[in-house]
């Protein structure tokens, strides 16, 4: 396992019913994105900037939040985080005008930044855990699969500390660049094998994974705190596809629930 990356400056300031495992919701694209694309070319105009129409304006993010809310997301802390973090800063410049659509976008090496609706659903499920509901935040979080760092930035607003692991070095470096000097939260990025978790900083109150396999690594369960919750995609034999697995850990054992159908990249071992 490689040494952890540098720690970044720390200045960043009702569970929905489980869906049937064989079904998938139809998620609509964000209608106002064509407006954002047009207005992005006018950001040098002070009048336009003051109207809040550019990609860097809160108005664009609030439109995305309104769509998430209309599609059933009800967790207010999660919606507030989406309203705060500028998603277009985490994707390639050529794709920036699509950043606020409800779509996944390529980030290199065969990986993608997940749909906002899927990220919001997973974070909402984390928040619906008994521990997070009582605390009002996610506590200490382990994120498996940093990717470009967008979800990491959201988690930083929702937790007391985030430790995020990425197994692909170019993506780890990209996330470090995106989050360098990130002004909110306590974030630490680690280049390592995500299947092993990160024992030195365990236990974690919340664990979320951005890759799915046929099994759930034992290290994740071992490193989850009592009263903690884990959300991860996992292969479902009954449907033949992936679903979101929600696992709660208690003194008497673990409880598992299957939720929405999803499609994530495969969970792999080692680093590359």
Image (cartoon, rainbow, N blue to C red):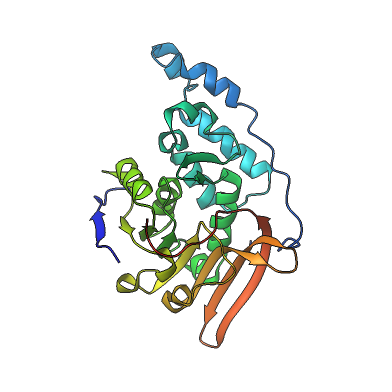
Task: Give residue 140's position: percent from left, percent from top.
Answer: 38, 65
Q: Nearer the viewer, residue 84 or 150?
A: 150
Horizontal side of 14 relative to 156 (left or right) equals right
Q: Nearer the viewer, residue 254 or 67?
A: 254
Does residue 16 show up?
Answer: no
Q: Quadrant of residue 70?
A: top right
Q: Between 158 and 235, which is closer to the camera in this rendering?
A: 235
Residue 56 against residue 170 in the figure, above or below: above
Q: Can you give x and y, in whole percent of width and height, for residue 114 in the image? A: 54, 46
Q: Quadrant of the N terminus?
A: bottom left
The total number of labels drawn is 0
- Residue that appears at 76% across and 62% down: 20
Is residue 180 placed above or below 243 in the rendered structure? above
- Quadrant containing the C terminus is bottom left
Residue 105 visible in the picture: yes
Give the residue at x 52% y 50%.
Answer: 78
At 42% across and 17% down in the image, what residue appears? 43
Is the residue 42 above or below the residue 264 in the image? above
Q: Position of residue 96 (x, y in %)?
A: 48, 29
Residue 98: name its quadrant.
top right
Determine the residue located farthest toward the bottom in the rendered image: 252
- Which quadrant of the figure has residue 129? bottom right
For the point 57% across and 57% down, which residue is it? 122
Residue 142 percent coordinates (x, y)? 41, 64
């Amino acid at each position: 396992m490689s040494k952890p990356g540098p720690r970044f400056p720390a200045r960043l300031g009702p569970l929905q019913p489980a869906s049937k495992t064989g079904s998938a919701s139809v998620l609509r694209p964000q209608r106002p994105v064509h407006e954002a694309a047009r207005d992005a070319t006018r950001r040098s105009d002070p009048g336009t900037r003051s109207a809040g129409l550019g990609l860097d304006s809160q108005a664009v993010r609030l439109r995305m939040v309104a769509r998430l809310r209309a599609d059933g997301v009800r967790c207010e802390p999660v919606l507030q985080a989406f309203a705060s973090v500028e998603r277009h800063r985490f994707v390639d410049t050529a794709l920036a005008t699509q950043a606020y659509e409800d779509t996944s976008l390529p980030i290199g090496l065969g990986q993608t930044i997940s749909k906002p609706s899927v990220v919001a659903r997973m974070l909402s499920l984390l928040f619906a855990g008994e521990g997070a509901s009582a605390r009002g935040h996610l506590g200490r979080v382990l994120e498996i699969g940093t990717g470009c760092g967008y979800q990491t930035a959201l988690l930083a607003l929702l937790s007391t500390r985030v430790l995020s692991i990425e197994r692909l070095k170019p993506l780890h470096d990209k996330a470090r660049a995106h989050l360098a000097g990130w002004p909110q939260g306590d974030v630490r990025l680690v280049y390592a094998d995500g299947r092993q978790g990160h024992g030195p900083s365990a236990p974690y109150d919340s664990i979320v994974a951005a890759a799915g396999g046929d099994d759930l690594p034992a290290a994740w369960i071992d490193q989850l705190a009592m009263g903690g919750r884990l959300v991860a995609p996992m292969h479902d034999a009954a449907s033949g596809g992936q679903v979101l697995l929600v696992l709660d850990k208690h003194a008497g054992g673990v409880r598992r629930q299957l939720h929405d159908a999803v499609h994530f990249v495969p969970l792999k071992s080692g680093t590359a």
